[in-house]
Amino acid sequence: MDRNVIVEKLRDIFVRILEHEEFDIKDELSAADVNGWDSLSHMLIVGEVEDTFSIKFKFRELNKMKNLGDMIEIINSKVDL
Amino acid sequence: MFNNNVLQKFVDICEYHKYRNAFCISKTYYTYNELGECISRIRKELQSQTFIVKNVGLIENDDLETYASIFALWLEGLAYVPLSPEAPIDRNKDIINQAGITTILDSSINDTFLEYNLIKSSELEKTTLDLEVKEVSENDLAYLLFTSGTTGRPKGVPISRYNLNSFVDAYDDLDVEITYEDKCLQMFNLTFDLSIISYLIPLLHGACVYTIPKTEIKYSYVFELLDESGISITMMVPSMLQYLRPYFEEMNFPNMKYSLFCGEALDLELINEWSSCVPNAIIINTYGPTEHTIICSSYNYIGDKSLTCNGVLSIGESLGDSELIIVDDNDNLVVNGEKGELCLTGGQLNPGYWNNEEKNKEAFFNLEIDGKIKRMYRTGDLCFMNEDGFIMYLGRIDFQTKIQGFRVELSEIEFHAKAFLSSINAVAIAIENKIGNNEIGLVIENEKIDITELLDYLKSKLPSYMIPTRFSFLPVFPNNINGKIDRKILINNFI
C-alpha cells in the first residue's frame, strides 16, 4: 500500500478518536506530544487501525511502536503480505 | 513502632544491600547506596530550612529524587503531600491551601511553584550519608492524600505513622515471600495509595522497584516490563487486565510469583484467563479504602472453585488487626449471609478527614463490639459475610465509582459541569465500555449543544481521569419512583 494512503487513513483515525486536529502527522510523533493520547485512546486507536487495514497486531509489535513512523512501518509490513 | 519497624529497617536494608538495585526508572538502575545518598542530600536541604510546616508538598515525577524525597521527609519527621504536575493548577492550589503547605519539593526543571518555598531536589550538592532516624510521635503524619470530594473540592485523607506501621504489619498476613531477588512493579501515581504498597514493601526487603515513565502508554509499558525484565511481584488494578486481555494468548510470564489486585471488583472469568499467563503465580485479590491505609483484607484465588458472588471474586478475610463488620441501615450488626454496609476498625483506621468535621460525622461512628466502644469507618461498600467468614463484595452503596482504579465521586464532576452550564442540569454516570472498563458519561438536560468550551472548563478543574469521555443530551430527565433522577435509564442513553 502507498505510504501516503496509510498516512491519510491514520490521520482520519486520530482525528476521530482524539476529537481534535492539533498535531502534525510526522514520523517522530509520539503519545507524549499529543493531547489526549493516553492508554484509553491508544487502545481505541489500535482497534481502529486493525479494523481499517484488516490486520491484527501482536502485543510485542505494539510495544515496538514508539512513534508514528514505527506504526506506519508495521502496518505496511502487514498489509503487503 | 514506625521508626523501628519501618524506617530503621529501611535504613538497615540500604546499608546491607547497598550494591543491589533499589529502582529501575526509565531503564536506568539505581542502587540502595545511590538512593541513600540522594535521601541524604534532600534531608540536608530540609534541615537547612529555618521554618518548615510538617506537611510538605511533593511534585510527583518519575525519578529517583521523588522517591528519595519521601524517605528524606520521613527521616526528618515530616509528611508528604503528593501533587501531580499534570493536575490543573487550581486543584493543586486548593490542595496546597487545605494542607497548609509552604514548602514544596520538585525534581523537575519547571518553575510552576515558584511562589512557594521551592526545593529543587535534583540540583542539590553531594553530601555525606546521613540516614539517622529522627524521633517523632507515632501520631504524626506519614502522608496526606487528596481524593475526589462530593462538594467539588478534593478531600484530604491523613495517614499517621501508626497507621502506616499497622499496614506494614498487616501485609505480613498475606504470606507474600519477598526477597532481595524480587523485581516489583510500581505502576501507580503517588496520589493513589496503591503506590505505597508498590514501592515501600519491596524497599523493606532489598528488592528492586520498576516504575512507569510518564511519557509511555502505561499498559503497553507494563507488558514490556513483564515480558523483558522478569517482574516477579505485581500489584495492579483489574482495569489493567482489561487492556491486556486481547493479547493474553501471547503472554507467558513464568517468573511471576505473586499477582495482586486491588481497587476494583475482580471478575472470576477475567482472572481465570489471566492465570494461564502467570502459571507459577499466586493470585491474590485484596481490598481496602484509602481511609483504612491501603489494604485490609485478602482472598487467594484457587481457580474455578474460587468464592464469588455475581461473578466477582470474594474480598476474603481481614489482615492484621483490622476488623471487618457488616451493619444494617441502623448500624446494627447483621447475621452472616445478610447484606449491609461494610465497616472497618483497627490500627490502620485513619484519624479522619483533614479539617472536615462535617464529612467525619458522616463517615465515622462509634460502635459497641463485645462490650468495647470502637471507632468505625463506613466504606460505602455493599457486602455480606458467608458462613465461613469470607466477605463477598456486591457493589457501591452510593454513586462513587472507580475510573482506572481512581475513586471518583460522580457528584464532583456534576458540580463543575453544572457550574459551567449555569441553569442546565447534568448527570455524570459510569458506563462500562467495549473492553469492560468504566468510562464517565455526562448527560445534559438540553437540546444538543457544542461541548468544546464545557470540556475546556472541566479540564481546567479536574484531573484527566475525571473528564467525561462520552456526552449525550435529553430534553427532560426521567424520574424514578422516589422522584430522583433515574440514573439507570440515563445509562441506556449511552448504549
Image: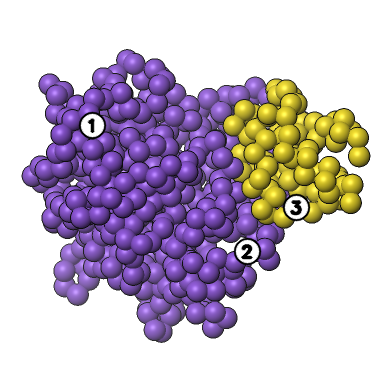
Image hue for chain B: purple
| First along the sequence among labels 1 and 2 | 1
Q: How many marks?
A: 3
Determine the image quadrant of residue B320.
bottom left
Q: Are marks 1 and 2 on the same chain?
A: yes
Give amino acid for label 2: Met
User: Could you tell me residue B262's position as x and y percent?
Assistant: 45, 60
Tag 1 residue: B42
| Disc on res. A57 | 3
For the point 50% across and 37% down, which residue is it?
A: B214
For residue B153, side relative to residue B273 (left or right): left
For the point 41% across and 58% down, which residue is it?
A: B183
In the image, is residue B26 above or below residue B482? above
Query: Residue B305 or B229: which is nearer the viewer?
Result: B229
- Chain hosting mark 3: A
- Chain hosting mark 2: B
Image hue for chain A: yellow
In the image, is residue A10 above or below residue B212? above
Q: Is residue B495 visible?
A: yes
Q: Are marks 3 and 2 on the same chain?
A: no
- Numbered disc 2: secondary structure: loop
Query: Residue B114 or B438: which is nearer the viewer?
Result: B114
Tag 2 residue: B251
- Numbered disc 3: secondary structure: loop
Give amino acid for label 3: Phe
For residue A22, side relative to residue B332 (left or right): right
Q: Is residue B154 visible?
A: no
Q: CA distance from mark 1 to mark 2?
A: 41 Å
Give the position of the N terminus of chain B as an image quadrant: bottom left
Residue reaching furthest to the front: B19
Q: Are marks 1 and 3 on the same chain?
A: no
